[in-house]
Amino acid sequence: MTKQTDLKAKDASTKRKATGPVDFPPLESVTAPYVDTDQAAHYLLRKATTLRIWACNEDGLVRPRRVGRRLFWPVADIRRVLGTA
């Protein structure tokens, strides 16, 4: 094997594998008081980046709770915004 072939093989093995869409449970069946950013974005039909911007600017439809560097979104507030509370 040549050096170039070895580098290509190494690059192919270290690339992140794409994951498919995550199936979240229906909002009605969620019993936890908080959900993570990806799950909240799914329910609110927004991108996770949008929710992170809301958290940073503190001007979104829902305000998260910060635990360290992580954001947790109140399920009750998500239901209120969607009108399913």
Image (cartoon, grey):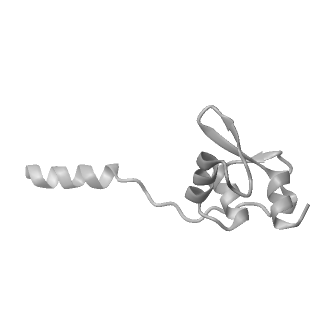
Q: Where is residue 56 in the image (x, y as percent from the top left)?
A: 59, 46
**32 or 53: nearer the eye?**
53
Q: Which residue lies furthest to the right in this view?
A: 85
Q: Where is residue 4 in the image (x, y as percent from the top left)?
A: 11, 53
Rendered residue at 68%/68% (across/down): 45
Q: Position of residue 78 (x, y in %)?
A: 79, 57
Residue 51, relative to residue 20: is it above or below?
A: above
**63 or 20: nearer the eye?**
63
Q: Where is residue 52 in the image (x, y as percent from the top left)?
A: 59, 51
Quarter of the picture holding the C terminus:
bottom right
Rendered residue at 55%/57% (across/down): 49
Q: Quadrant of residue 69?
A: top right
**35 or 56: nearer the eye?**
56
**74 or 22: nearer the eye?**
74
| Side of 72 where 85 appears, left or right | right
| Side of 49 where 40 appears, left or right | right
Residue 79, relative to residue 37: is it above or below?
A: below
Q: Residue furthest top?
A: 68
Total number of numbered discs in the rendering: 0
| Side of 47 where 35 appears, left or right | right
Rendered residue at 70%/44% (across/down): 72
